[in-house]
């Protein structure tokens, strides 16, 4: 790991903000990979909804914890790629995270 990597401070900030929940996450390559999956995968909510059962319930629970965290809205902009689509990326990740948080029960 490069101690001068500018993303390291972001990951440390997120890890502190997530507290105990951080123990259940894996940070890969100096980025919050889970948010990149939400950003680059429009069908992720439907895919999770189709899994249903224990996995769907688990993901919904964890995403409820993330989106209800008091710093979620403040930290989110620092975790998405900054490019010409920055604003739409933030909105897409926010909407998908909230949609996953709203899932419950088995696949319909």
Image (cartoon, grey):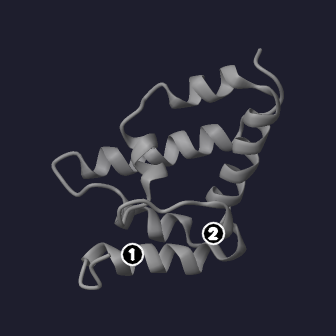
Can you tell which quarter of the image residue 54 is in?
top right
Picture residue at 66% right of the left edge, 50% below the top? 63
Q: Residues within 10 Å of mark 2 (few under 14, many from 20)?
A: few
Residue 69 picture location, percent across and down: 65, 67
Q: Secondary structure at mark 2?
A: helix
Q: Residues within 10 Å of mark 1 (few under 14, many from 20)?
A: some
Residue 18 picture location, percent across and down: 62, 72
Image position of 76 (left or right of 30): right
**Placement of the N terminus among the 4 image quadrants:** bottom left
Q: Secondary structure at mark 1?
A: helix
Q: Which residue is the site of mark 1?
A: 10
Residue 103 picture location, percent across and down: 73, 34
Q: Is residue 92 visible?
A: no
Residue 84 picture location, percent across and down: 16, 48
The tag earlier along the polypeptide, 2 or 1, is 1
Q: Residue furthest front?
A: 1
């Amino acid at each position: 790991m490069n101690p001068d990597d500018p993303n390291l401070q972001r990951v440390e900030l997120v890890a502190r903000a997530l507290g105990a929940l951080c123990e259940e996450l894996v940070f890969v390559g100096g980025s919050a990979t889970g948010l990149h999956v939400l950003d680059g995968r429009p069908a992720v909510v439907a895919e999770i909804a189709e899994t249903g059962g224990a996995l769907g319930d688990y993901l919904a629970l964890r995403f409820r914890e993330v989106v209800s965290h008091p710093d979620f809205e403040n930290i989110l902009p620092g975790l998405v790629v900054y490019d010409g689509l920055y604003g739409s990326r933030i909105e897409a990740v926010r909407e998908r995270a909230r949609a996953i948080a709203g899932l419950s029960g088995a696949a319909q």
